[in-house]
Every structure is written in structure tokens, then in C-alpha cells.
Image (tube, rainbow, N blue to C red):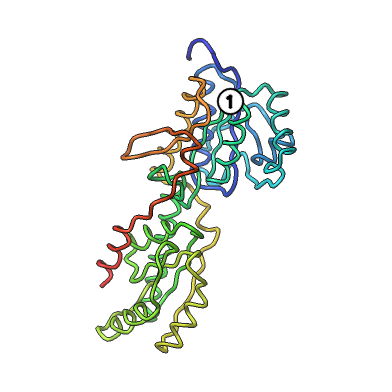
Amino acid sequence: MGGERLVKRIGVLTSGGDAPGMNAAIRAVVRAGIYNNIEVMGIERGYAGLINGEIKEMNLSSVGDSIHRGGTILKTARCEEFKTDEGRNKALNVLNIFGIEGLGVIGGDGSFNGAQKLSHEGIKTIGIPGTIDNDLSYTDYTIGFDTAVNTVLDVVSKIRDSSISHERTSIIEVMGRHCGDIALYAGLAGGAESVLVPEEKFDIDNICEKLIQGKVRGKLHHIIMLAEGTGYAFELKKKILEKTGIEARVTVLGYIQRGGSSTAIDRILASKMGAKAVELLMEEKSGRVIGIKNNQLIDLDIDEDLSKEREFDKRMYELTKILSI
């Protein structure tokens, strides 16, 4: 076990949408904390639970047999009250009552906004990126993204088998309102003929032309990967039918992408980031977010992260077009 404790008690919470790997991150925070003689308090239901005092001490058994589980053992919720001054004051009072000196926040940009506000109020906060969307600008990957892509890939393989048998066109709608990374990565890895993302405009005539050319050369199926922020799958189906007479089948994956046991990549990433959060809190750092760049862990100022504009990987997007001819 570690030596002298500068920080004696920290908290950990998950907020916003759940993501596979969150439990691995919680486990890492708890066990790294205990290893260093720090008490770790689990805050249930995110900022809502913080306001309501839904807090319990975590021990080694609290996170036993959790590294592989999807979802979050601490549960999660969105909290409009926390966005108000009154709500945040309640949260600050609760943190003071429980003697929580530092906080690890696992979530996406909305969760980080909350962490930023607490940091400005003097609470030591560290953000751990947990979101399947991979939509945080400062990090190459977020916890849960790899699992979500692999979940989509598994579905694509099953749909392709059926599509080939029935010579069908399939539209697969995946999550991604503002960020199309799930569609982009799964589309490239799954060999989709068309990948439609919110960052890039698409031409319906180009999609229809590719469909017709494929049929002419004897192609038995056609997969269109659509991020939800690009448009409605059933509207796309209607336009394709009007222009080509081709009947497409729609599959909307929805929350299936959030669930399931996390991949090895997500478990390792979450474990590293959770332990890093404890390390930063022990150094009495605050207002930091943890990420990964060029396969190396980094930590940045949370204000800098939230002000950055995300860059879309256009080279990968162009590659999907090149390889789908």
C-alpha cells in the first residue's frame, strides 16, 4: 500500500449516457484509491445522486467481478437541477458534508461541463471520457467507443448474411447525432458501400448510382451505414425507392450499441484512465480531463478541452469511398 495521504477521501460518479467500460473505470478508481490509502465514495445516479446525497463508501468487494460488465454499477442519470446555481450549491454542500476532497467524473461533454463548474467552485475534479460517440475533441478515443463499433460490426455481419440470401439493400442506422465516428469506423471495418455521417453532406443520386451499378455487375447486397444525425433512415429508404425502384430494409440499432461486455481495448483504456485520475487527485490537480493521444495517456485543462472544436477524420471518410467502389 502507498504512503502518506494528502487526499483522504474522493468520490466517483458516472453521468449522462452509459458506455461499456464505465465499470472498469470505476473499478480502477476504487482500487487505485484503496491501494493508496484513500477512501473512495461511490455517488449513484450522477449529479442527481450527488444533490440527493446518494453516496456510499466503496471497498474492494464493491467492484469485484465488475470489469467485464456493461452499463454502470453506480447507475447514471441526467440532471437539469445541477445546471442551476441552486442545484450546484446543494451538490457543493453534500460534498462538504461527506468530506469528499476530489471527484472523478466519468462521462461525456455534458458531464465534463458539470465537472468544470465544480472545479471553478474549488472542488478538485478529474474528467474521465466515457461515451460511445467518441465525440470529445482532445482525445483519440473515449471509453466505450471500441465496444460500440464492435457491436455494430457483429450486427452488420448478420445482416449481410441475410441480405446476400435475399439480394437486398440494407440501411443500418447507428448512434451519432453530431459525431459520425461509429458509422465511420463500423462502415469502414464492415465494408459498407455507403457511409453517411453528419459531418459531411451526401448526394442521394450518388448513392442511387452506386446501387444501380452494383446490381448491374451482379452484386448481391448493398449496405448503407447511416449515423442518426445525418437524417432519418426511413426517409432515405423512401427516396431510394422513388429514384431506383429498389426496396431497402431498415435496421435501427438504438440502445443495443450501449450495452454488452466491453472489449479488451475499452477495459484496458478505462483501467489506465481510472488509475490516472487517482494519481492526479493525489497530486492535488484539478480541472483536468484524461485522454489518449498516439497511444499515450494525456491530461489537459478542462477549459481547454471544452473550448476545442472537434476535427472530423476526412481521410478515413474518403477511404470508405475508395474501398467501396
Relative vertical location of residue 156 with respect to residue 42 in this rendering, above or below: below
Relative vertical location of residue 123 with respect to residue 193 in this rendering, above or below: above
**Along the horizontal axis of the image, is 64 left or right of 148?**
right
Report the residue marked by disc 1.
102
Across the whole image, how many numbered discs are drawn on residues? 1
Locate the C terminus by quadrant.
bottom left
Which corner quadrant of the image does residue 64 belong to?
Answer: top right
Q: Residues within 10 Å of mark 1 (few under 14, many from 20)?
A: many
Which corner quadrant of the image does residue 215 belong to?
Answer: bottom left
Q: Residue at x 75, y 38 (%)?
A: 86
Relative vertical location of residue 126 with respect to residue 249 in this rendering, above or below: above
> Residue 243 in the image: x percent, y percent?
42, 87
> Residue 105 in the image: x percent, y percent?
56, 36
**Along the horizontal axis of the image, is 153 left or right of 127?**
left
Residue sitting nearer the eye, 1 or 135: 135
Relative vertical location of residue 262 with respect to residue 242 in this rendering, above or below: above
Check the image and name the residue furthest to the top: 4
> Residue 6 in the image: x percent, y percent?
54, 14
Residue sitting nearer the eye, 293 or 273: 293
Q: Secondary structure at mark 1?
A: strand
> Residue 48 in the image: x percent, y percent?
69, 41
